[in-house]
Image (cartoon, rainbow, N blue to C red):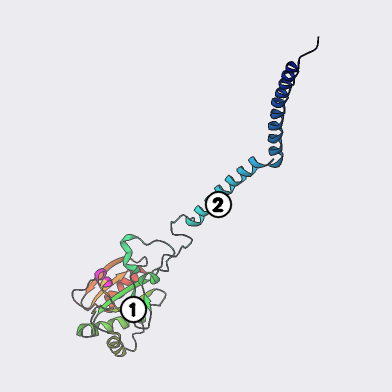
Amino acid sequence: MGKSYAEKMKARSGKGSANGRSDKRVSGASKKDKDNEKFPYAPVIVIGVILVLLFSSLALYLVQNPEQDDSGNGTGDDDGNGSNGPIDSKLQYLTVSIESLDGGMIDLQRYTGKVIIIDMFATWCEPCHLQMQELIEVEDSYSASDLVILSVDTDLQERANQVREFRALYPEADWIFALSNQRFNEYFSARSIPTMFVLDRSGVIIDTHVGVTSAEDLGQQISSLI
């Protein structure tokens, strides 16, 4: 028995609808496959970007925070005093700089290894003139490798030209003359002058002489230290 026109149309409509759904699913899957084919390395690119950002951050940190050496002073190892190592806290006076009459700044540290006599004087001091004569005799008795004499003007009001005039009176006095300063005077206090400080080869102050001291007395002490 033949189908009516209505039944034929209904059958065609159902078949088209089923095919329509099937075609849509196939179309969606096909689009996804095409996207994967278009961007096959997308995950790798994302990971690469993250790694680049991490390494960039690390490089920036290292630039802003350079490494220091074990001493905590960067790459430098000079303590500014020309020394080869730290100075005992009890001997800090060795690093105090004073102005040499011959120009430049000097400190006692450079003379360690020798006996040092520090003669604190002033140009207006009459007994200081007498002490010069005694020191000339002492200096003549010892070699420069064993003994160093420094005559330091303790009067902070005096100037280099005044000390030069004083030294010119004693041409035999070819040792070091210098101008003191407040810090040096604190370490080598002289309530009356002349006052002399005797330092051993290690730079330790072992004796203080107040007033004019004879070359003989100084000589005995120096000989015991050399």
Which residue bears the numbered disc 1?
99
Secondary structure at badge 1 equals strand
Tag in front: 2 or 1: 2
Secondary structure at badge 2 equals helix
Q: Position of residue 90 (x, y in %)?
A: 31, 61
Q: Position of residue 185 (x, y in %)?
A: 25, 72
Residue 68 makes an appearance in the image: no
User: Any magenta on residue 185?
Assistant: yes
Please state if 149 lies on the left or on the right of 40 as rendered. left
In the displayed structure, 159 sits above or below 34; it is below
Distance Cα–Cα, label 2 vs label 1: 53 Å
Screen quadrant of the N terminus? top right
Q: Position of residue 141 (x, y in %)?
A: 36, 79
Give the crowd class for mark 2: few <14, some 14-19, many >=20 residues within 10 Å: few
Please state if 64 lies on the left or on the right of 55 as rendered. left
Q: Are marks 2 and 1 in contact (CB under 8 Å)?
A: no
Q: Name the amino acid type tagged 2.
A: Ser
Which residue bears the numbered disc 2?
56
Residue 9: quadrant of the picture: top right
Magenta residues, as a range? Answer: 183-192
